[in-house]
Image (cartoon, grey):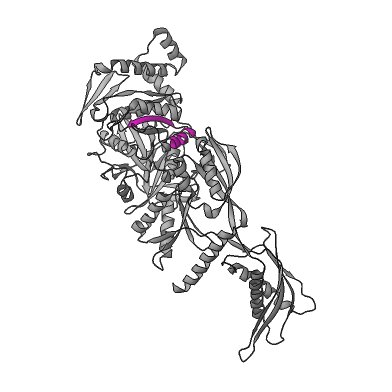
Amino acid sequence: MKRYATDHIRNLVLIGHGGSGKTSLAEALLHAAGVVDRLGAVAAGTTVGDSDPDEIERGISISAALLPCAWREHKLNLLDTPGYADFVGEVIACLRVADGAIVTLDAVAGVEVQTERYWQMARQRGIVPLIVVTKLDKEGADFAGAMQSARDRLGCNVVATHLPIGAAQGLRGVVDLLAEQALIWRGDKVSQEAPPAAMADDIAVAREVLMEAAAEADDELTEKYLEQGALTNEDMSRGLRAAVLAGRTVAAVPVAAVSGIGVQAAAEAVVSYLPGPAQAPAQCAVAVEGEQQLELRADPEQPLAALVFKTMADPFAGRLTVFRVYQGVLHSDGNVYNANRRRRERVGQISVPRGKQQEAVAAVGAGDMGVVAKLHETVTGDVLCDEQHQVTMPALDFPEPVLAVAVQPKSKGDEDKVNSGLDRLREEDPTIGVSTDPDTRQTLLSGMGDLHLEVIVGRLKRKFGVEVEIGTPRVAYRETITKTVQVQGKYKRQTGGRGQYGDVWVRVEPQPRGAGFEFADEIAGGVVPRNYIPAVGKGIAEAMQRGVVAGYPLVDLRAALYDGSYHSVDSSEMAFKIAGSMALQKAVAEAEPRLLEPIMNVEVTVPDQHMGDIIGHLNGKRGRIQGMEPGAPGSQVVLAQVPLAEMFAYATELRSMTQGRASYRMKFSHYEEVPGHIAQRIIDEAQQRKQEQPQR
């Protein structure tokens, strides 16, 4: 593929609800541009965009795909993204490097939940949208209805640049409203004809709407329209582009990607109305030297600045790094500097995807995108630059994982393979979380939802040959006491030679919540020698870590050593340590112990219409509503405190209750006493686990 001038490049992210036709549209554009000879199908697993085995098996997009093609002397860098909420990280990364968005609306369903969400994300980043109404050859397709759905739910001024000819099985082509020409499809052949006479009134009305939108773009066109009552086609095209770039108007095109109808019209609209890198807002950067704020312009003469927005593991090429050059030129077989890692990187052969193959290129210039293999240090979010002009860019803002499971290898000895595999997968997908709970010693795998976690587990097996078992994470409960007691801990043992003797009296009393553990020395008169007293405290502390009631650590108590006795020959530090441990266990049994559970501060951002359901659901989870705050227009933020034990499946439940419109975040607040009936169940489960352990 030849190198294109910056103003002849379009960086486009395809966004929309799952199943709205993004991948089919991308495939049809590649076919129309001559990149692929045969039109692939999602159902058959033959598209370029969905080439991963997981995508083929499920029939959905899981990873974003860079799919360049050429149209009318312009290069279109298509970024086909997943539509399912579990893979939102892929959308976020692509939105960061796109200048325009192709928003797909199913002609039957109209605007769906994820379309709304991704629309808002794109608008917040200043990305200029183009609406493509897809699947017009489906039964029940309604182009006008989909347009109205966009006006009502996206709050935008949508105008059609083309009208469909026919509908469902009778769809034959589209009418270009500017040229007033019909494009008729007969198999693979497209012909230009006069518009159907039966559509004359519809065309006149739609053309008038288009003309008004163009006239509002600037004062000169407004004055001309008012004076003459019409605009030329050239005026309309220029005015519509200005209106779209300014965000006043959103152009819409009808398409049936599987049959190819309207695909050329969509490509023409992209070139005509969406911005190139030079028209997009300047990207912010910070000079490493002096921390000066900079604006990156799409200028090949400036020092290099390129952002890595995706990392992939290829079974043949190794790690593949996908990047966008914001300014300067990135050359093959050269050296660059990774400003985030403070390391030099050797760049090998740069390439651009061409269908399912990679095409080698000598360089990638400002505003363009490319792929390079086998960078050693570079990961998603890093900036590659000139070492003499080091810059960093704001980090990619990926969401925190919302759903966690405990994982363990099915085969003993595979722990290292699991950890290594998860580390590799995290390089590809920053929305994966991996941690080890220090209390339960479980390895926790977290992600954006059930499907996301299912895909991760499947890839562990397919890519790294290791199978894992998954389960619900255990809660890191705590134990405490509620009553002051005085107990004796006495350890005496004779084995024929020198024995073991340690005798202590300890007063154990509860502390305020969060105060922790305190050991006090109240010995008087030398009844316990000074050198043995620290051993008593150590024995008590170790016994606290093991727990007494259910095996969870004890917290918030004070232990005072106030009496005891020793033997001049048989006493030792070990004996007094064991005596201290025995005293603690005896004391807890008498001090009315209680289980404590972690309580989380939860913030749920929810549309107004779902407020009642969410509050009722949180109450059912033993939650306490702390208040409400205004959120984005049409939404509220519910503040609550909820036990962690009730929150493990909340992401899935919340998505189900609100059709994916709500989101939440949480963080640890404090520990509280577990209700008695729940505490007994937890104790029984802990005892059962303890009984099962020796059998494994």
Residue 542 placement, left or right of 244: right
Q: Residue furthest front?
A: 677
Depth order, front residue of 220/429: 429
The N terminus sits in image quarter: top left
Q: Residue furthest top?
A: 227
Membership of 69 in magenta stretch: no
Q: Which residues are magenta?
A: 116-139
Residue 58 seen in the figure: yes
Membership of 134 in magenta stretch: yes
x then y, percent, for residue 357: 28, 45
Image quarter of residue 30: top left
Image quarter of residue 187: top left
| Count of all numbered marks drawn on residues in the image | 0
Q: Residue furthest right?
A: 525
> On screen, 690 above or below 460?
below
> On screen, 397 above or below 696?
above
> On screen, 620 above or below 575?
above
Residue 390 seen in the figure: no
x then y, percent, for residue 314: 34, 52
Depth order, front residue of 64/555: 555
x then y, percent, for residue 658: 46, 40
x then y, percent, for residue 654: 48, 45
Image quarter of residue 208: top left
The C terminus sits in image quarter: bottom left
Residue 175 placement, left or right of 559: left
